[in-house]
Image (cartoon, rainbow, N blue to C red):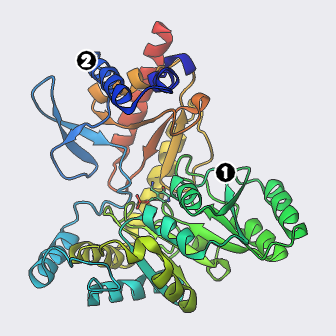
Amino acid sequence: PEEKNDLYHFEKANRNNSLKDKSFNFNVMLNSLEANKQFTYRRIIVSATGRTVLVFDKELNKERKMLMFASNNYLGFANHPYIQEKIGIVLKKYGTGVGGPPLLNGYTSLMKELEERLSTLKKKEGTLIFPSGYMANLGLVSAISTKQNNFVLDKYSHASLYDGIKLNNANLITFKHNNLESLQDVLIKLESKNYKETFVCVEGVYSMDGDLAELPQIVNKCKKYGAALILDDAHGTGILGENGGGTAEYFKLEKEIDISMGTFSKVFALTGGFLSANRDLIDYIRYYSRPYVFSAALPPITIASVLAGLDLIENEPWRRKKVLENTRYTIEKLQKFELTAEPKAAIISVRVPEWINIRKANVQLDKMGVFLNAIEFPAVSQNDQRFRISISAEHTLQDIDKLVSCLEKVWQDSVKTS
Ligand code: PMP
């Protein structure tokens, strides 16, 4: 796809240009893509996000219903009446915002309650709540990195961890995705250099492929080489495990995780993130994490929504069951396609071969009423383009059948034109 990717060419051609020229040229490129209808970014959404969504179609000049397969609203909380009712009550009592960070004036009784509930869910002593998952990872690194310690990341770790490490000049070493030998090689090297502390960072469910970390073996390696384990479970929390505790609960390894990270931007369909760990560490991070100290606390209505979401995770376990059943059904139906990995939660990535122009393919899907995310460079490497399907507990089997038949049609039409 290298020659098909305008962004790749844009970056190459504009490397030495001034910001003024770069931004001008970028807009020329964007306008041309939009004019040639090769573009599905920034679709205008005019309804709540559920199994379907209404978008405003500029060409038709009217609203159009689409099947939503691009949202991390895995359990269908984005438009749940119970959550909306709770928000209404809290809005009346607490108003819209707190006007400051949690250490100063943003620590509401709701936030305290949420810290306790998340600690219970993650089987940890304490929890800290951040304005986003991205900031939770940034904040974690900012609080715990020193010149003497090391962050050992699975190569496929989220940008927020990489950025946190860069921002704090922390020591970064990566290992091949989910590859235990590669992890062991890194740990042996660090041991021989006599480094003080090592943090191994993995994701529970990998966000681009939907596969799970090889957690039991990773835990063993960490124990063997004396490394601490950080688990970013953005996509497993609320879905995996008997109580929705996430990937660690699924593997019954909660106690082996030193720091559990999660976000409210997936199953909770909100914004916000959190870290759970032992109480001493959480209280230390509370005072040393720059994103925590220098950014306003989440609004009470967001906190109340997460609390309501936790009620639903407890009281409506069928949602977890349903989303996993839907995922299995989708995988079965997609047998003719190549998946990028073996999905175990609610993310399925269908590899899009090089002979398919993924952007054009997504425009065709859009016209057929299927809202899907095309993942292309620079989100993944040039030859790794894919459609990332997000499954929801709200999808019906007919929705999934429609998705698959539309993908088949796009593949067939691409054969004809390639
Ligand atoms: N970690 C992972 C694995 C993620 O997928 C994401 C979201 N894409 C984040 C962290 C950041 O979460 P948030 O959207 O809450 O900033």
Q: Quadrant of the N terminus?
A: top right
Question: Where 135 falls versus 387 (above or below)?
Answer: below
Which residue is situated farthest in the front direction here? 18
Where residue 79 sits: x, y (%)? 22, 60
Amino acid type indicated by mark 2: Ala
Disc number for residue 83: none
Considering only order in the chain, which callout, 1 or 2, is on the residue closer to the N terminus? 2
Disc 1 element: loop
Residue 199 or residue 180, whichever sits in front: 199
Where residue 407 sits: x, y (%)? 43, 28
Label 2 beta carbon within 8 A of ligand 1:
no
The picture quadrant where one finds residue 294 is: bottom left
Q: Is residue 1 visible?
A: no
Q: Residues within 10 Å of mark 2 (few under 14, many from 20)?
A: few
Residue 308 or residue 131, whichever sits in front: 131
| Residue, disc 1 | 155
Disc 2 element: helix
Horizontal side of 328 relative to 88 (left or right) equals right
Residue 380 or residue 162, whichever sits in front: 162
Q: Residues within 10 Å of mark 1 (few under 14, many from 20)?
A: some
| Residue, disc 2 | 35
Query: Residue at 63% across / 62% down in the picture?
Result: 202
Query: Residue at 81% across / 54% down in the picture?
Result: 182
Which residue is situated farthest in the top direction here? 417
Where residue 220 sits: x, y (%)? 79, 72
Which residue is situated farthest in the right direction here? 192
Residue 43 or residue 247, whichever sits in front: 43
Where residue 263 sits: x, y (%)? 43, 66
Amino acid type indicated by mark 1: Lys
Q: Is residue 39 visible?
A: yes
